[in-house]
Amino acid sequence: MRTLIALSTVLLVSLQVRAAPLTEQHQQPIVDSPSRDYAIKKFQKGVGHFSDWSRTTKKEFLIDWQAGKASEWTLVQGNEGGDLDSMTAALAWAYHLEHSTENTSRPLKAIALLQTPTDALDLRPENKLALDNSKMTSGHEDLLTIDELPEDPETLSHKVRGIVLVDHAEPLRKWSSAKILSIFDHHVDRGVAPDAEPRIFEMTASCTTIVARQMLDELEKLPQEYHLAHELLELILSAIAIDSGGLTSDSTTDADIKTSERILKRSNWSNRELMEVMENLDDELSDSKKSLDHLSLRDLLRRDWKGDLVDTPSRRTPTVSLGFASIPYSMDYQINVTEFEELFDWFAIHAAWTAEIGVDISVCLNKYKVKENGKKKKKIREIVLVVRDDVRIDEAQANSLFGVVKEAIESHTELGLKPWHRVDELAPRQMVWSHESDASRKVIRPIVEDAVMGWD
């Protein structure tokens, strides 16, 4: 009997030990194990000077911020759309600022800031491919993205030495307090920072062309040239190639061609023909750029999103948040990739995304091609206008703003707008048009912005 009781006691204690929760001492190795952390955040380290420079610069910036030395840094930033041109131009100029001054009495500290969240970078497959080709660390560990800033831009803009704008004519509102040191852009000059130096606006296929040309001009005037990493040179060629259709598009300029020639001569591809290199790059990157079928509607909306606060004359609502999405698919296709494959679901997902980022009025610009009677494909564009009433403006104001913007868009008869085939199913403050003009975001955005700025 005593033996049976003893065995029962041992068994009970054993079960209690197994069932008891782990103590903090027991749990600690599981939570903080270095090998476990490495398994969660494993990445393939980049190879070469360009990757090493980018990663080291990111580390030094964060160290200086922690030490209260943000004032020593220049942030080179492109637009929030985060395409290959914008990213490359920012990286190239930051690289140039640091390397061109490193042997002077006043060396500069500069870092490229990508105004795109880390998890959104791969929504542009061509970016990932170009960075992989440039031997950068996987997972974009070498790059500083907007969601990695240790401080909000409104606060940080007061502390940094200044900002440089590339592929962007004016800073987003959250950076408006920062000093603008230089501007490089291939869009319309909006008169911002007239004293910036250099301040270059030129209609080229790629903004990277302008930055690379200035970089080479200054490099060749130095007493001793610094090392230009071949990975950066090849990234520059990639950005120019995809924006210029391999130097064959109608937007290609002499500057794009001549700058590409100069970059090629310094690259590891110097023994190859320029047009062959650029055509191959364009083909490879363009094929990658089209690989979007795996993206959800939310990803399509945020993949190429640009927006900011816009001032209005209204006393009740002096600013509204306006955003633009560019999507290379029709509205019908986008509806089919939603969970329920229904119109209501498109607007539900769109509403969730715009609520998340606090947008009042949004415009989605869709473009796609259709075959017409078995002939050459025809390009179709769509404009989707939506105004919310739950962020800064009430229902009456939202109705008024929607009417003003809708009228402004429809007043441009040269667009040839037609109501979408399911327009009767739309809810209040929703409108969709289709058209066959070449009017892209560069045309539509000013129309909408002017209407918003005139709304009272």
Image: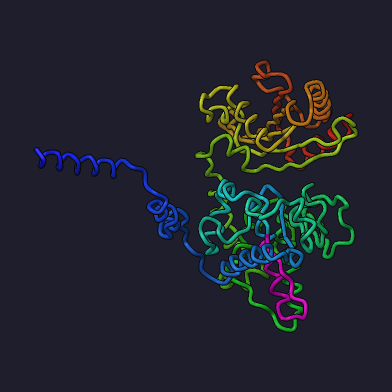
**Residue occupying the far front of the picture:** 2
Q: Nearer the viewer, residue 209 or 82?
A: 82
Image spot of residue 133 (x, y percent): 53, 61
Q: Give the colouring mode of the picture.
A: rainbow
Q: What stretch is highlighted in magenta?
A: 91-112
The verdict on residue 56 being magenta is no
Image spot of residue 152 (x, y percent): 71, 51
Q: In this view, does 107 lie above or below 239?
A: below
Question: What residue lies at 66% left-to-right and 52% top-to-bottom?
Answer: 146
**Residue occupying the far top of the picture:** 424
Image spot of residue 186 (x, y percent): 77, 54
Question: Is residue 292 visible to us here?
Answer: yes
Question: What residue lies at 62% left-to-right and 49% top-to-bottom?
Answer: 117
Q: In this view, does 180 lie above or below 233?
A: above
The answer to which quarter of the image holds residue 310 is: top right
Give the side of residue 187 with respect to residue 191, left or right.
left
Image spot of residue 240 (x, y percent): 66, 58
